[in-house]
Image (cartoon, rainbow, N blue to C red):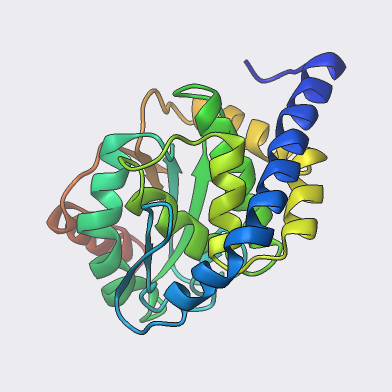
Amino acid sequence: MIDQTDTQVEKKRKFFAIPLIIVLGIITIGTAFVILFLQKPGANVVSVNGKVLTTPYPKPMVDGNTMGDPNAPVVIEEFSDFQCAFCRQFFLETEKPLIEQYVSTGKVYFIYRTLGSWLGPGSQYAAEAAYCAGDQDMFWEYHDTLFTNQRRMEFSPVNLIQLADELGLDLIKFGDCVESSKYREQINKDLADGISAGVRGTPSFLINGRLVIGAQPFSFFEQAIEKALNDIGQE
């Protein structure tokens, strides 16, 4: 599951390259309409092809797929899949208060990691696309929009490229990144590290190394974090 042959990688590059050409053609026709929609203020904006673009809530000290102070006393690693319904539930119900109460206050350093093609090829494509969006400081915007639109779109290369355009990413840089499988090794490492830690489903979390399984409510994370702080003599 972790290793891929050169032939498979080449096929995947072509699978991304062809949709990129198609999307660039579509953009020459539709970009003006997309821009008009994106310029409207508001929490949610509906794009021309039916996806919802959200206004992300503030995330502190963002660096790629991480946020918060790297020296925070508690480290939370999320092992997730963009196609996972329970991962979406965590995003919708728990992530924001966790960030506001613990990440923004310097108590938690949060890392988002994927499990590659855990739930199929679309999971792999979405994971690589999100990491590539991070090259343009847009990982979390892409992350939020993927989960927001999980039930509205198939995570195919053409849709993921369209999404990058709708978020204002440089499509040439984005296309080069996904076509080259730049983050394949990182995603493979995410998967290997997750399995080594005992992850058998998504979402799963490591809270200072302690495995937590499932989209638990915020109250559960609150107790777990407070316990971790207490264990190291901080409150």
Q: Relative to 89, does residue 15 appear above or below in the rendering?
A: above
Q: Number of callouts in the render?
A: 0
Q: The N terminus lies in which quarter of the figure? A: top right
Q: Is residue 186 left or right of residue 229?
A: right
Residue at image point 56% right, 45% down? 160
- Please state the horizontal and vertical placement of residue 167, each as a whole percent of the image: 54, 65
Residue drawn at the location 75% of the way across and 34% of the way down: 18
Q: Vertical placement of 61 versus 151: above or below?
A: below
Q: In this view, does 97 lie to the left or right of 51?
A: left
Q: Nearer the viewer, residue 157 or 30?
A: 30
Q: Which residue is drawn at 52% across and 39% down?
A: 114
In the image shown, does 200 or 37 lie closer to the viewer?
Answer: 37
* Residue at (43, 26) in percent of width and height: 198
Nearer the observer, 172 or 118: 172
Where is 162 relative to 140, above or below?
Answer: above
**Residue 188 shows in this picture:** yes
